[in-house]
Amino acid sequence: MDQSQTAAMFHWASPLGVSAICFPVSGVVHLLIGTLTPIFVNSEFGRSAIFISQQTDSQLFGAAPSEPLN
């Protein structure tokens, strides 16, 4: 097959077309996660959301949950 026949056979609604769309979309999602993670972890919200409960985290870390962050 030459290139013109191959290009004519491609359809966006085919499984190949759907995967061609999903690949860059997943890349954008991962880029967004990677960009926002340091911002949220270093915020007050991130420091409070990391821990599930005060009692469980105190048993796990052996100290108040806020102490390892300081």
Image: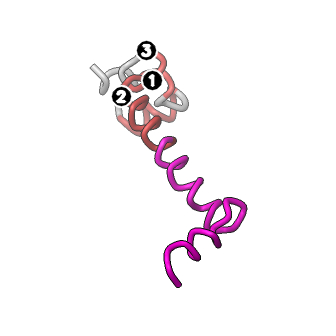
Q: Residue furthest bottom?
A: 1
Residue 26 picture location, percent across and down: 52, 49
Question: Vertically, is 14 above or below 60?
Answer: below
Which residue is identified by label 1? 46
Distance from disc 3 to disc 2, alpha carbons, whole Å, reads: 12 Å
Magenta highlight on residue 29: no
Residue 35 picture location, percent across and down: 39, 32
Nearest the viewer among 40 and 12 is 12
- Tell me the SS state at disc 3: helix
Tell me the amino acid under the disc marked 2.
Pro
Tell me the amino acid under the disc marked 1.
Gly
Is the residue under label 1 in contact with that under label 3 (CB below 8 Å)?
A: yes
Which residue is identified by label 3? 44
Tell me the amino acid under the disc marked 3.
Glu
* Residue positioned 42% across, 22% down in the render: 47
Tell me the magenta residue range. 1-28
- Tell me the SS state at disc 1: helix
Q: Is residue 64 visible?
A: no
Which residue is identified by label 2? 38
Q: Quadrant of the C terminus?
A: top left
**Would you call the spot at circle 3 few (<14 residues within 10 Å), some (14-19), or many (20 or more)?**
few
Distance from disc 3 to disc 1, alpha carbons, whole Å, reads: 5 Å
Q: Is residue 4 left or right of residue 62?
A: right
Nearest the viewer among 66 and 2 is 2
* Residue positioned 46% across, 44% down in the render: 30
Magenta highlight on residue 2: yes
Distance from disc 1 to disc 2, alpha carbons, whole Å, reads: 9 Å
